[in-house]
């Protein structure tokens, strides 16, 4: 992503009361869900977390739409985007724009969730103040022109909350109110905090393989709760790589699923950084 800009730092003065209200209600219902937990509800929680967090946010919003680390048939790309809406982290265009800004301006005053503004700000404070994910048209035009050309993405970007209502009604029909609590409210809150931890914790704690200009780190614990998104230093070093865990020990479930999809022919042009091959290339260069 090029660092040329006609874009002002986010306006942090205004409070977003709507967001504050919904996030608070979701947290209250999430706590309620713990008291009504059952095996069936836990299963609903896990399945919806996998679909929204891994397929939706990890594969869809992040590795496909933000960084274009692979290609898939249009129907599958759209399916992943729809899964992403279930995470209630805004629609694909807002999410991708925010995340591209994070990569273009990491840890400057133009970074929407810069860790230099404090851990709480980087974690969730930023969605409560100012522009948050509602960027002006000029910023969206500049950072997500590829997505804006797709009418389906423009449509679900506007109505991203609909999947949660539909899935919520479905869960209610199957397992009653307690299943809706687990599969929508608890799962959304857990999904939020795991994604937010990538923005807060993996810029604070963990190891660094690459000397990037930011404070990004590789954190196994965060990778475990985000299907592989916690290898954040690797990711900041090679953003386009759809492979974030670069060794056998760096488990990256999102990457493993992409490899499986490639095997059955559903994913192509899959780019994954190969640590060994790159080291061999470097050694050759040095020898020459
Ligand atoms: Zn980052
Ligand atoms: Zn990224």
Image (tube, helix red, strand yellow):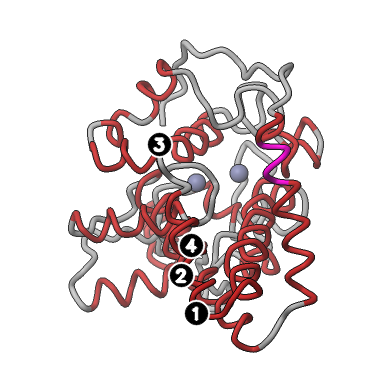
For residue 31, side relative to residue 137 (left or right): right
| CB contact under 8 Å: marks 4 and 3 | no
Residue at image point 73% right, 59% down = 206
Name the residue nearer the viewer: 285 or 243. 243
Local packing at callout 3 (Cα closer than 10 Å; few below 14, some 14-19, many 20+) is some
Q: Is residue 21 magenta?
A: yes
In this figure, what is the number of numbered marks? 4
208 up-or-down from 111: above or below:
below
| Above or below for 175 versus 92 | below
Which residue does the image show at 48% across and 47% down from the upper left?
161
Q: Earlier in the sequence, mark 2 or mark 4?
A: 4
Q: Is mark 4 within 8 Å of ligand 2?
A: no
Identify residue for label 1: 174
- Residue interval drawn in magenta: 19-23
What residue is rendered at 54% in x and 66% in y? 228
Label 3 – label 1 distance at C-alpha: 28 Å
Dot placed on the residue nearer the N-terminal end, 3 or 1: 3
- N-terminal of the pair, mark 4 or mark 1, is 4
Circle 4: element type: helix
Q: Position of residue 151 (x, y in %)?
A: 23, 36
Query: Can see residue 283?
Result: no
Work out how far the residue at label 4 is from the one at label 1, CA to CA, in angstroms: 19 Å
The response on whether ligand 2 sits within 8 Å of label 3 is no
Which residue was labeled with disc 3? 158
Report the residue marked by disc 4: 52
Q: Does dot 1 land on a helix, a strand or a loop?
A: helix
Q: Is residue 146 visible?
A: yes
Q: Main secondary structure of the magenta part?
A: helix
Q: Is residue 172 left or right of residue 257?
A: right
- State which tag comes first along the sequence, 4 or 3: 4
- Residue denoted by label 2: 170
Query: In front: mark 4 or mark 1?
Result: 1
């Amino acid at each position: 992503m090029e660092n040329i800009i006609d874009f002002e730092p986010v306006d942090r003065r205004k409070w977003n009361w709507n967001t504050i209200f919904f996030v608070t209600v979701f947290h209250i219902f999430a706590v309620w869900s713990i008291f009504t937990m059952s095996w069936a509800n836990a299963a609903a929680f896990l399945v919806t977390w996998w679909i929204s967090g891994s397929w939706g946010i990890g594969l869809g919003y992040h590795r496909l739409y933000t960084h274009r680390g692979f290609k898939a048939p249009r129907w599958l790309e759209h399916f992943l985007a729809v899964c992403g809406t279930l995470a209630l982290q805004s629609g694909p265009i807002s999410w991708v724009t925010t995340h591209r800004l994070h990569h273009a301006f990491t840890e400057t005053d133009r970074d929407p969730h810069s860790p230099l503004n404090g851990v709480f700000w980087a974690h969730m404070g930023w969605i409560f103040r100012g522009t948050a994910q509602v960027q002006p048209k000029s910023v969206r035009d500049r950072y997500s022109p590829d997505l804006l050309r797709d009418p389906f993405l423009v449509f679900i970007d506007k109505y991203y909350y609909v999947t949660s209502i539909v899935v919520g009604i479905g869960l209610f029909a199957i397992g009653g109110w307690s299943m809706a609590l687990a599969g929508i409210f608890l799962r959304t809150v857990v999904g939020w905090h795991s994604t937010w931890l990538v923005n807060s914790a993996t810029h604070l704690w963990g190891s660094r393989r690459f000397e990037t200009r930011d404070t990004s780190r590789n954190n196994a614990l965060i990778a475990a709760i985000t299907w592989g998104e916690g290898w954040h230093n690797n990711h900041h070093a090679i953003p386009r790589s759809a492979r974030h865990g670069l060794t056998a020990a760096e488990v990256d479930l999102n990457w493993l699923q992409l490899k499986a999809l490639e095997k059955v022919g559903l994913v192509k042009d899959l780019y994954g950084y190969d640590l060994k091959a790159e080291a061999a290339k470097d050694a050759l260069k040095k020898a020459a």
